[in-house]
Amino acid sequence: MSNTTKSTAAGSEKYDGFTDEERAAMKERATELKTRTRRGPKPDPEVDVLAKIAEMSDSDRAIAERLHAVIKANAPVLSPKLWYGMPAYARDGKVVCFFQSAAKFKTRYATLGFSDEANLDQGTLWATAFALTELTADDEARIGALVRQAVS
């Protein structure tokens, strides 16, 4: 998440802080943590992920649904969960990869990201996030290979 500078209504003062979208993501994360610590029956995290995907715009939803299927097929060891209000996939409770819809932070494209828990290391430089505007069969195959490598 990045700091931004916004002007006040008067236009003369500026402040550094979080965007509305960043604050909303932090609130979602706090809710996720509270839900996890509540007593009683635990909700199924995959149901929560699928519900979050269902709320997305058509283009983001189409990508998220395919990613969900590709990740589950190629890395069944990963468990779906929400992370800052985004679909994420974790091993032993630690997020390995996640999907950020374009609408999440009002960006031009959706993103598939990998955390430092992913085994993607290649020399001294490697990608940890990928822009997605749609998914082709070739893209799905590449993502499947990345996810398999991430959990190897």
Image (cartoon, grey):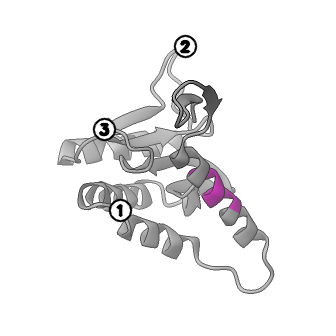
Is 26 part of what is drawn in magenta? yes
Q: Which residue is mark 2?
A: 124
Residue at the outermost top position: 124
Residue type at tag 3: Arg
Identified at 56% across, 24% down, the residue is: 12
Cα–Cα span, label 3 and label 2? 28 Å
Mark 2 or 1: the one toward you: 1
Q: Which residue is mark 3?
A: 108
Taking depth in this image into account, of 105 and 146 the one nearest to the observer is 105
N-terminal-most mark, 3 or 1:
1
N-terminal-most mark, 3 or 2:
3
Secondary structure under the numbered disc 3 in the rendered image:
loop
Cα–Cα span, label 2 and label 1? 36 Å
Residue 136 relative to residue 102: left or right? left
Taking depth in this image into account, of 103 and 14 the one nearest to the observer is 14
Taking depth in this image into account, of 138 and 34 the one nearest to the observer is 34
Q: How far from the left and from the top, in percent, is residue 71?
A: 42, 55
Q: Which residue is mark 1?
A: 56
Secondary structure under the numbered disc 2 in the rendered image:
loop
Q: Quadrant location of the N terminus?
A: top right
Q: Quadrant location of the C terminus?
A: top right
Residue 74 occupies quadrant: bottom left
- The boundaries of the magenta stretch are 25-30
Residue 44 relative to residue 133: left or right? right
Residue type at tag 2: Thr
Residue 149 relative to residue 35: left or right? left
Residue 127 occupies quadrant: top left
